[in-house]
Image (tube, rainbow, N blue to C red):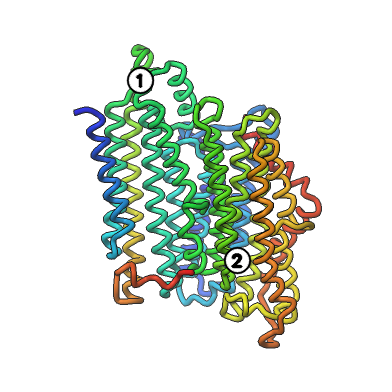
């Protein structure tokens, strides 16, 4: 398995998520598509952190060992933060969807289209 | 984490603490008018901490202080934005009070959300690391989405949902860009990214070829472009501006935009110095700038709702500010500092002007319950003070003396000329002329049309303070811009050092 495999999968998932977020009518499905986009980024971040060692460190393995660990872990830490924030984002999104549902008895995005030119 | 870190973070920590205190006070106090007073008085604490940090920097030898494992930097650039954001938050809270008192519940939560969003923006101006930038961005975006949906009626929830979904999409795009940059350089710290890019281009070998880096940078520009509402990432702005509670619109158009430009300057100067890259990101900003100015102004011409008009006007102003970013990187000797300091000066002047305009709009719409420009007819007779202030703001937004907007535009456009971007200046000037049409239409409605009713528009003390602060800022800096200009120059100097 090379890095390219992971990155291609991530790119495909990201594209599916973006397509869904733009075209889906159901507000819940929009939130699910957003989650797909964030998870595609997570896959890239973890894959990068597994495979990439900066050139400057790779050429200098003695002094670079500690630094390499720090570089490698960054991607995983990034992922943990993305998961946390995405959860908060979806929680707020659901709260707003709920209040839209109370207003209009519908969670279809096309029903919430009062504001336009 | 040491005591020194706490000292560097003191403005943000005290601001977040103030938000929590407000929520707690709300539980025990029956008289809710205490809340805005407490909020505005409490804002002096982060202000004092920022001033202490400023004088500490002025007296010491160092230009910047690093903390929190090198994710945080306190320099005069970040402190400039802290002053600006604290002032904007204060004026927004003052102008919210009449509006918020109509709420039966959740008054403290409203102020607390404003303060939390301000905390995120202040962090945004002083982070030098991609993960921290992302967290601060979300700390800004989530409270604003909640505020936009705060009224929980049809229009407000719709604007909250639109803001949340589009901001999440843009965050995902931004994150994808950040991860690619991380993959290319192996680090998320901005100075180290710059260093690695230097190493890689020296060594010639790179994991993906420099196209990957280009792709990452373009995605990051798209993500940040959303935050500052520049074309082609502007679709959310008019809808969210129209549907949100008006004080939230004011907050969004001033504070959120300033923080967005702060982080753009920080990232693109910190991580991607122009002389190291073969690609020239200033050209991208020049194109975005021309598009934002033109589309923002042309669409604004046919608006009849003043909040929507201000929404498109903000898009156009994002375009003017991007002129400064485009001028930055054009490699003309001597022109380096004009670009960023022009951006900072413009943001300061724009904040004063727009807050004055929005305070007036809030005061009027509280009274007449309408945002239609036709309903502003004869406002000069019904509310002479408000009409005068709004007129000065409109003059300032157009860029006519004696208001601060004039100097801001002159300064930015001269930076662009220094950077050999004459075509962009021509587009900017043509756009200023177009914008005069719709700004002055508001003035015409207020002064030349017959009033629909003779009822006076009265407003309370906090609102008077907000209007006065915005007015004084617009006029004083319009007549005597030197102090603000020097401040902007100092701050930009700290960024470039």
Q: Residue at x 29, y 46 (%)?
A: A14
- Reading the image, the residue beneath label 2 is B301
Picture coordinates of residue B200 (x, y %)? 43, 21
Label 2 neighbour load within 10 Å: few <14, some 14-19, many 20+: some
Label 1: which secondary element: helix
Q: Residue at x 29, y 73 (%)?
A: A106
Q: For the residues carrying marks 1 and 2, which lies nearer the camera in this image?
A: 2
Picture coordinates of residue B331 (x, y %)? 63, 30
The quarter of the rendered structure image containing the N terminus of chain B is top left
Q: Residue at x 71, y 80 (%)?
A: B449
Picture coordinates of residue B385 (x, y %)? 74, 73
Q: Residue at x 73, y 47 (%)?
A: B410
Circle 1 chain: A
Tell me the CA gap for discs 1 and 2.
Answer: 59 Å
The quarter of the rendered structure image containing the C terminus of chain B is top right
- Reading the image, the residue beneath label 1 is A66
Label 2: which secondary element: helix
């Amino acid at each position: 398995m090379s890095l390219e495999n992971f990155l291609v999968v991530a790119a495909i998932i990201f594209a599916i998520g973006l397509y869904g977020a733009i075209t889906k009518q159901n507000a819940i499905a929009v939130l699910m598509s957003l989650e797909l986009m964030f998870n595609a980024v997570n896959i890239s971040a973890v894959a990068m952190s597994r495979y990439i060692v900066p050139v400057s460190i790779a050429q200098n393995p003695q002094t670079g060992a500690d630094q390499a660990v720090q570089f490698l872990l960054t991607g995983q830490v990034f992922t943990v933060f993305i998961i946390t924030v995405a959860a908060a984002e979806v929680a707020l999104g659901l709260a707003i969807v709920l209040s839209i549902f109370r207003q209009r008895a519908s969670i279809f995005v096309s029903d919430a289209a009062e504001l336009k030119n | 984490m040491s005591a020194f870190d706490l000292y560097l973070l003191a403005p943000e920590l005290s601001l977040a603490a103030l938000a929590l205190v407000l929520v707690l006070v709300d539980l025990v106090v029956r008289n809710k008018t205490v809340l805005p007073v407490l909020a505005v008085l409490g804002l002096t604490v982060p202000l004092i901490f920022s001033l202490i940090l400023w004088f500490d920097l002025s007296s010491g030898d160092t230009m910047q202080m690093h903390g929190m494992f090198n994710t945080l930097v306190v320099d005069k650039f970040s402190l400039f934005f802290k002053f600006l954001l604290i002032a904007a938050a204060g004026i927004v809270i003052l102008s919210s009070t009449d509006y918020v008192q109509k709420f039966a519940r959740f008054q403290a939560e409203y102020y607390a959300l404003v303060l939390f969003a301000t905390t995120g923006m202040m962090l945004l101006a002083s982070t030098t690391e991609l993960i921290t930038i992302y967290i601060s961005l979300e700390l800004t975006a989530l409270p604003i989405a909640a505020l936009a949906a705060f009224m929980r009626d049809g229009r407000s929830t719709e604007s909250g949902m639109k803001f949340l979904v589009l901001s999440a999409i843009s965050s995902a795009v931004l994150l994808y860009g950040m991860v690619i940059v991380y993959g290319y350089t192996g680090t998320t710290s901005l100075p180290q990214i710059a260093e690695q890019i230097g190493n890689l281009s020296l060594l010639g070998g790179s994991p993906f070829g420099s196209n990957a880096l280009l792709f990452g940078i373009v995605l990051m520009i798209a993500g940040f472009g959303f935050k500052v509402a520049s074309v082609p990432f502007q679709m959310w702005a008019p809808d969210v501006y129209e549907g949100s509670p008006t004080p939230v619109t004011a907050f969004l158009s001033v504070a959120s935009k300033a923080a967005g430009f702060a982080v753009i300057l920080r990232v693109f100067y910190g991580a991607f110095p122009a002389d190291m890259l073969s690609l020239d990101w200033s050209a991208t900003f020049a194109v975005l700038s021309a598009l934002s100015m033109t589309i923002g102004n042309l669409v604004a011409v046919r608006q009849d709702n003043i909040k929507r008009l201000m929404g498109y006007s903000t898009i156009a102003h994002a375009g003017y500010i991007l002129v400064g970013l485009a001028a930055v990187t054009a490699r003309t000797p001597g022109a380096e500092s004009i670009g960023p300091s022009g951006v900072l000066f413009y943001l300061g002047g724009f904040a004063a002007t727009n807050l004055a305009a929005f305070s007036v709009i809030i005061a009027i719409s509280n009274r007449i319950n309408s945002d239609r420009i036709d309903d502003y007819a004869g406002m000069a007779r019904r509310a002479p003070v408000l009409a005068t202030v709004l007129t000065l703001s409109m003059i300032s937004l157009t860029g006519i003396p004696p208001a601060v907007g004039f100097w801001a535009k002159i300064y930015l456009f001269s930076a662009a000329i220094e950077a050999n971007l004459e075509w962009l200046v021509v587009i900017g000037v043509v756009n200023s002329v177009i914008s005069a049409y719709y700004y002055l239409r508001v003035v015409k409605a207020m002064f030349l049309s017959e009033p629909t009713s003779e009822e006076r528009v009265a407003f309370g003390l906090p609102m008077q303070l907000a209007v006065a602060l915005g007015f004084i800022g617009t006029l004083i800096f319009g007549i005597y811009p030197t102090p603000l200009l020097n401040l902007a120059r100092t701050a930009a100097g700290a960024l470039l050092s």
